[in-house]
Image (spheres, rainbow, N blue to C red):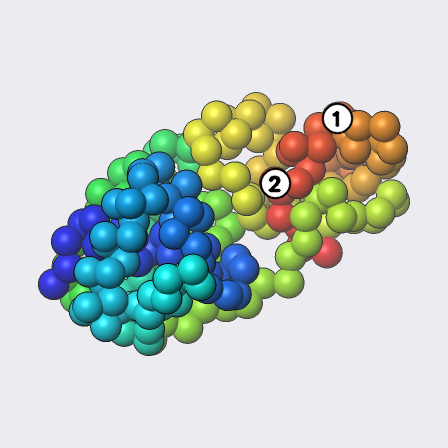
Amino acid sequence: MYSFTEENYLKAIYKLQERQEEAVSTNAIADSLNTRAASVTDMVQKLSGKSLLIYEKYKGVVLTEAGRKVAIGLVRKHRLWETFLVDKLRFTWDEVHELAEQLEHIKSEELVDKLDEFLGFPKHDPHGDPIPQQDGKMLSQALILLEQMPEKAFAIISGVVNHSPVFLQYLQKQNLVLGISVEVLEKNAFDKSMSIRLNAEKEIQVSAEVARNLLMKV
């Protein structure tokens, strides 16, 4: 059994490592968890002593298979709870992250498996992120950022990079939600903003910040 703090560290390291596929620096972990680098060093040494990660000074941190298993289990629970909160309790997608952060620390694997079955074994959470299966495997997604799409191209909104409530609320107001078809009409060379058409109907302008945070399935 691990503490909430230990689990949060493992999940944060997993997500950083997944993004860059190399050793994660203590500074990157500190930024991710909004804590001091000295506190991170103390914790990674503790987790290293439990064989959950490998820590080399000046090189960074890599999860062991045991550490990765714990982290993926947390990601699985988090995304299943987000799905439950949206699909069954009618929370909006910008409201569920903090609640799922609490629920992901429930230890019962039987409960999590029953939750997965109750939801019909969903493949993705409300933000489009893949949900790990019981064995830890996860569906790969061939997605690109909206900013990478050329003019006249079509794609479907299938995920978001930024999960902050304020960004998700903005997307909801603009109807930039999962499943919406997007056609790129024009890309502005000056500020990287884009003119797009939603579902072959509404035309809107999106900023470069929005374009680099929307994941598209071509």
Residue 142 in the image, given as x and y percentages of width and height: 64, 63
Q: How many marks do you count on the picture? A: 2
Above or below, 147 relative to 76 = above
Question: Which quadrant of the structure image shows residue 213?
Answer: top right
The span from disc 2 to disc 1 (Cα, nearest Å) is 16 Å
Asked which secondary structure carries label 1, the reply is strand
Where does residue 165 sit, x and y in percent of width and height?
44, 30
* Residue 193 drawn at (x, y percent): 77, 30
Quarter of the image with the C terminus in it? bottom right
Residue at the location (14% across, 53% down)? Answer: 3
Which mark, by number, is residue 213? 2
- Name the spot of residue 43 as percent of width and height, x first: 23, 54
The residue under the point 33% across, 75% down is 65
Left or right of residue 11: residue 130 = right
Q: Amino acid at mark 1?
A: Ile
Q: Circle 1 is placed at which residue position? A: 204
Of the two numbered discs 2 and 1 in the rendering, the one whose residue sits closer to the viewer: 2
Residue located 43% across and 60% down the image: 58
| 199 relative position to 90: left or right | right
- The tag on residue 115 is none
**Residue 132 appears in the picture as rendered:** no
Q: Nearer the viewer, residue 104 or 91?
A: 104
Quarter of the rendering containing residue 175: top right
Mark closest to the chain's N terminus, 2 or 1: 1
Q: Is residue 141 left or right of residue 132?
A: right
Question: Horizontal placement of 205 versus 168: left or right?
Answer: right
